[in-house]
Image (cartoon, rainbow, N blue to C red):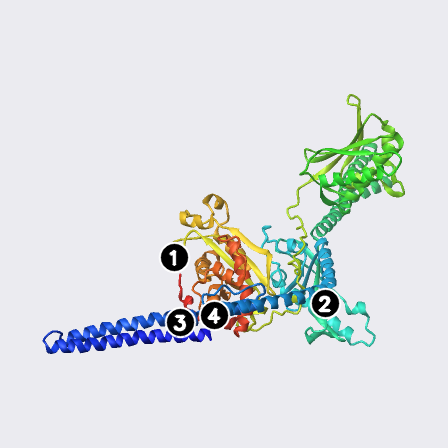
C-alpha cells in the first residue's frame, strides 16, 4: 500500500509540475497577446518563450520520471540479477537496497536464503556422513597410488585420463630435453603421450578377449580380466613396458559386453625397462665379444696342440715356438675371461635393488632403532649423532645397512658392555664416510674381522648375510680401526655418494573436506570425449584452460610483449590447482614504469628466462583439447596470435570470456571488472596482477557462472559464444 502511495505521489507531482508549466504558458500567452495589441510582444517572441517553458516542463518531468525509474524499475532489475546469483550459490546474500520497499523485500529474501542454506547444510552433513566410508576407501587408494614405484594411469575408452599417480606424471610428462611439458593431466588424452594405434590395438585385444570369455557358459573370472602387454618409448627416450587391464562397468559402451558388464576403460601399469634393456644389451655384447674374440686364440691353441701331438720328434726350437703360441693365446683368453668376469660381476651387483635415500634420514632411523633395541635389556645403550652432512644422498640397501649398524652396536653392548655409540656421516671426495665409533673399549683386529664376516644374528632375528655381504651389495667397503691417542675405535664404511634426485615425490597433502587429491577423479569415469563438434557439447562436459598474461604494456601492435603466462585447468567442473602453467618470459625489450607498478615484475627478474618462441609451444601443448577461458580474453588472444608465426603454433581453440559472460548474466550492472564480478559471486580475490593468480580467480568465477548460464538456457558452447557475441563489450578490438 505504501509503495502504491509513493507511485501516486510521484505521478501527482509530475502532473502538477506539467500543469503549472501549462498554466504559466497560458498566462504568458494571454499577457503577451494583450501587450502585442499594445505594441509590446511580437508573435516570434511569444513562441520562443512558450518553447522555453515547454522544454523546462519536459526536463522537469524527465528528472522526476528518471528518478522514479532508477528506484522502482532499474533497482528491481539489478535486484533480480543479484537474486539469481545468490539463489544458485550458497552463502551469498542480497546487498542493501536503496528504497524502503526493496530493502524490505531484500531482507525477506535473505531470510529465505538463510533458511535454504541451513537446510542445505543439514543435507550436506547427512551426505557427508553417508559418503565417509566411501571417501575413506578412495583416500586409501589414492595413498596407495601415490606410493607406488610403478606408473599407473587409468583412462576411459576415449583415451581420456581419469586417474594417475605422481610417478606417471614424472615419467610421461618429460620432454626430449628433460623439461616438464605437462602432457599428463585429468581429462587429457593419453594419445598425447602414446601412439594412438598402439593403444587401440591393445584395447582391441582386450575387448576381443572379453567378448570371447563372455560367450562361454562357464566364465573364468581371471580369464575375463585378462591383460595385454606392449613396449613403447616416451618422448624423453625411456623404454616402458606397459601392462593394460580392462575396467568393467555396468553402463559402458556395448561393444565388449561380458554378461551384465562391459569394458568402460583400461588401466596402464608402466615399468621403466630402460636400464634392464641396456643391461641385457651389455650382456649380449659381452657374450658376442667372447665368442668372436675366442675363436682365433682357440684355433691357434688347437693347431699348436695338434702339431705337438702329431710330431713328437719335433725339433726343440720348433717345439718351443709352438709352446710359446699356446702360452700367448692362453694369456689372451685368460685376459678376456677376467674382463668378462669383472663386467658380469658388476652386472650382478646392479641387479640388486638399491634405493636413493638422504643420508641424514638413514642415520636418524639407525640411531632410533639401535636405541630402542639397546634399551630393551638390562644395560642401556645411548646413541648420539654428530657431524652429519644434511645434504648428502646415498644409493644403498637401506634395510641391510640398518641391520648391519644395529648388529655391530648391539654386539658391542653385549660383549664389551659399551654404554654409548656415536654415528657420523660426512662426504669424502666422491664417497660418503659413515662411522660407528665408541671410546674406552678396544676390539682386537681378529675379533672385528670375525664380526664383519659372521652372519648377522640380532636377538630373535637372524640373517644369512654378513656385514661384508651387505656393504658389498652397496658397492662399498668397511673396516675396523683404532685411534690410541683419542682412545677411540670405529667401524668405518665408505659408500658411493649419489646425486640428489631431480624429481622428488610430491608430498601427499590432505584435501579439504569434500575434495580429493586433484590427480584422482573417479567422477569423470563415464565422461566421454565424444566425436561430435565442440560447439554442440554441453558446457559441463568440456575441459577448459583458464589463462592470463602479463605484458610490457597495453599496445600489442606497438611492440609490447608478453612477460608472463599463467594458466590452470578445469576438468569435470573442478579447478585443478596443481595442474598449472606458470612461466616468465624475457621480452628482449624494456618495461614501462606503468606496467611494473601494476604487475611488479622487473627487468632483472626476466633476465635469463626463456623467450616467447620457446614458451608458446609448451603452453600450446598444455592447452591441447581444451576450451580457452580468460577475462577480457580479446586482449590476451591478440598477444598470442601475433606470436603464432614466430613460435610455429596456432591457437585455434574456442575461447570464452568471463567479461562477456558477465554482461550476458548481469546486463544491468555498470561494471564487469574481475574484482566486481568476483565480489558479486562470492569469490575470494588473491594474487591479482600475477598471471597465475588472475587465472585462478577467473577459473573460480567461471565455475560460478556455469549454473547461472544453465538457468538462462545457455547449456552448450555454441550458445555461450553466440550470447557473448551479442553483448556490447564484444565490439572491443585490440
Q: Secondary structure at mark 2?
A: strand
Q: Secondary structure at mark 1?
A: helix
**Residue at mark 1:** 557
Residue carrying label 4: 101
Q: Residues within 10 Å of mark 2 (few under 14, many from 20)?
A: some
Few, some or many residues within 10 Å of mark 4 (<14, 14–19, 20+): few
Q: Callout 3: helix, strand or loop?
A: helix
Question: Percent x, y for residue 344?
Answer: 77, 44
Q: Position of residue 373 (x, y in %)?
A: 84, 39
User: Which residue occupies the foreground of this view, 289 or 729?
Assistant: 729
Query: Quick one: which residue is furthest to the left in this view?
Result: 39
Question: Which label is found at residue 69?
Answer: 3
Q: CA distance from mark 3 to mark 2?
A: 62 Å
Helix, strand or loop at label 4? It is helix
For disc 2, the marked residue is: 247
Marks 3 and 2, the one that precedes in the sequence: 3
Q: CA distance from mark 3 to mark 4?
A: 14 Å
Label 3 neighbourhood size at 10 Å, few (<14), some (14-19), many (20+)?
Answer: few
What is the x, y in percent for residue 468? 82, 37
Front position among marks 1 and 4? 4
Res. 355 image quadrant = top right
Amino acid at each position: 500500500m505504501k509503495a502504491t502511495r509513493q507511485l501516486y505521489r510521484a505521478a501527482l507531482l509530475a502532473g502538477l509540475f506539467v500543469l503549472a508549466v501549462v498554466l504559466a504558458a497560458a498566462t504568458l500567452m494571454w499577457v503577451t497577446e494583450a501587450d502585442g495589441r499594445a505594441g509590446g510582444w511580437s508573435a516570434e517572441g511569444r513562441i520562443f518563450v512558450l518553447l522555453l517553458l515547454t522544454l523546462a516542463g519536459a526536463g522537469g518531468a524527465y528528472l522526476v520520471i528518471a528518478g522514479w525509474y532508477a528506484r522502482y524499475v532499474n533497482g528491481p532489475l539489478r535486484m533480480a540479477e543479484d537474486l539469481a546469483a545468490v539463489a544458485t550459490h550458497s552463502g551469498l546474500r542480497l546487498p542493501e537496497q536503496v528504497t524502503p520497499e526493496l530493502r524490505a523485500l531484500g531482507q525477506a529474501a535473505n531470510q529465505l536464503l538463510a533458511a535454504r542454506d541451513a537446510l542445505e547444510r543439514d543435507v550436506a552433513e547427512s551426505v557427508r556422513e553417508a559418503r565417509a566410508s566411501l571417501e575413506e576407501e578412495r583416500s586409501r587408494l589414492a595413498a596407495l597410488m601415490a606410493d607406488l614405484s610403478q606408473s599407473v594411469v587409468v583412462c576411459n575408452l576415449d583415451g581420456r585420463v581419469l586417474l594417475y599417480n605422481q610417478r606417471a606424471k614424472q615419467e610421461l610428462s618429460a620432454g626430449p630435453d628433460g623439461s616438464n611439458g605437462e602432457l599428463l593431466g585429468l581429462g587429457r588424452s593419453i594419445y598425447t603421450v602414446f601412439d594412438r594405434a598402439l593403444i587401440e590395438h591393445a584395447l582391441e585385444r582386450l575387448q576381443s578377449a572379453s567378448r570371447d570369455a563372455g560367450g562361454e557358459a562357464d566364465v573364468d573370472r581371471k580369464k575375463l580380466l585378462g591383460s595385454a602387454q606392449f613396449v613403447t618409448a616416451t618422448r624423453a627416450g625411456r623404454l616402458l613396458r606397459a601392462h593394460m587391464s580392462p575396467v568393467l562397468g555396468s553402463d559402458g559402451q556395448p561393444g565388449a559386453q561380458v554378461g551384465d558388464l562391459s569394458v568402460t576403460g583400461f588401466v596402464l601399469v608402466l615399468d621403466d625397462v630402460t636400464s634392464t634393456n641396456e643391461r641385457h644389451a651389455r650382456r649380449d655384447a659381452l657374450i658376442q665379444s667372447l665368442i668372436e674374440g675366442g675363436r682365433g686364440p682357440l684355433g691357434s691353441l688347437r693347431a699348436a696342440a695338434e702339431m705337438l701331438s702329431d710330431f713328437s720328434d719335433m725339433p726343440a726350437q720348433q717345439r718351443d715356438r709352438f709352446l710359446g703360441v699356446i702360452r700367448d693365446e692362453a694369456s689372451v683368453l685368460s685376459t678376456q675371461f677376467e674382463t668378462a668376469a669383472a663386467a658380469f660381476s658388476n652386472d650382478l651387483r646392479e641387479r640388486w635393488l638399491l634405493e636413493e635415500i638422504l643420508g641424514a634420514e638413514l642415520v636418524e632411523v639407525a640411531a632410533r632403532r639401535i636405541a630402542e633395541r639397546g634399551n630393551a635389556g638390562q644395560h642401556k645403550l645411548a646413541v648420539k649423532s654428530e657431524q652429519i652432512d644434511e645434504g648428502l644422498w646415498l644409493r644403498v640397501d637401506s634395510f641391510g645397512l640398518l641391520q648391519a649398524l644395529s648388529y655391530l652396536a648391539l654386539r658391542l653392548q653385549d660383549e664389551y658392555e659399551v654404554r654409548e655409540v656415536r654415528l657420523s656421516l660426512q662426504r669424502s671426495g666422491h664417497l660418503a664416510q659413515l662411522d660407528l665409533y665408541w671410546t674406552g673399549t678396544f676390539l682386537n683386529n681378529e675379533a672385528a674381522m670375525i664380526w664383519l664376516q659372521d652372519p648377522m644374528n640380532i636377538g630373535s632375528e637372524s640373517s644369512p648375510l654378513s656385514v661384508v655381504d651387505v656393504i658389498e651389495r652397496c658397492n662399498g667397503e668397511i673396516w675396523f680401526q683404532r685411534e690410541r691417542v683419542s682412545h677411540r675405535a670405529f667401524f668405518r664404511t665408505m659408500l658411493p655418494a649419489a646425486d640428489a634426485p631431480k624429481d622428488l615425490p610430491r608430498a601427499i597433502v590432505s584435501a579439504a573436506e569434500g575434495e580429493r587429491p586433484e590427480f584422482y577423479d573417479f567422477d569423470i569415469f563415464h565422461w566421454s570425449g565424444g566425436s561430435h563438434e565442440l560447439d554442440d557439447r554441453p558446457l559441463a562436459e568440456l575441459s577448459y584452460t583458464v589463462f592470463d598474461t602479463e605484458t610490457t604494456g597495453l599496445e600489442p601492435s606497438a611492440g609490447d610483449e608478453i612477460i608472463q603466462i599463467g594458466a590452470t585447468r578445469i576438468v569435470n567442473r573442478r579447478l585443478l590447482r596443481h595442474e598449472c602453467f606458470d612461466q616468465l618470459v624475457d621480452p628482449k625489450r624494456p618495461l614501462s614504469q606503468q606496467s611494473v607498478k601494476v604487475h611488479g615484475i622487473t627487468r632483472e627478474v626476466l633476465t635469463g628466462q626463456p623467450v616467447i618462441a620457446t614458451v608458446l609451444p609448451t603452453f600450446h601443448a598444455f592447452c591441447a583439447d581444451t576450451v580457452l577461458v580468460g577475462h577480457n580474453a580479446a586482449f590476451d588472444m591478440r598477444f598470442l596470435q601475433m606470436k603464432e608465426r614466430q613460435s610455429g603454433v596456432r591457437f585455434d581453440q574456442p575461447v570464452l570470456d568471463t567479461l562477456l559472460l558477465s554482461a550476458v548474466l548481469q546486463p544491468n550492472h555498470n561494471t564487469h571488472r574481475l574484482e566486481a564480478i568476483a565480489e558479486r559471486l562470492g569469490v575470494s580475490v588473491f594474487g591479482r596482477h600475477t598471471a597465475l593468480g588472475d587465472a585462478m580467480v577467473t577459473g573460480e568465477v567461471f565455475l560460478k557462472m556455469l549454473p547461472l548460464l544453465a538457468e538462462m538456457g545457455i547449456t552448450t558452447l555454441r550458445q555461450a559464444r553466440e550470447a557473448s557475441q551479442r553483448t556490447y563489450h564484444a565490439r572491443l578490438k585490440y
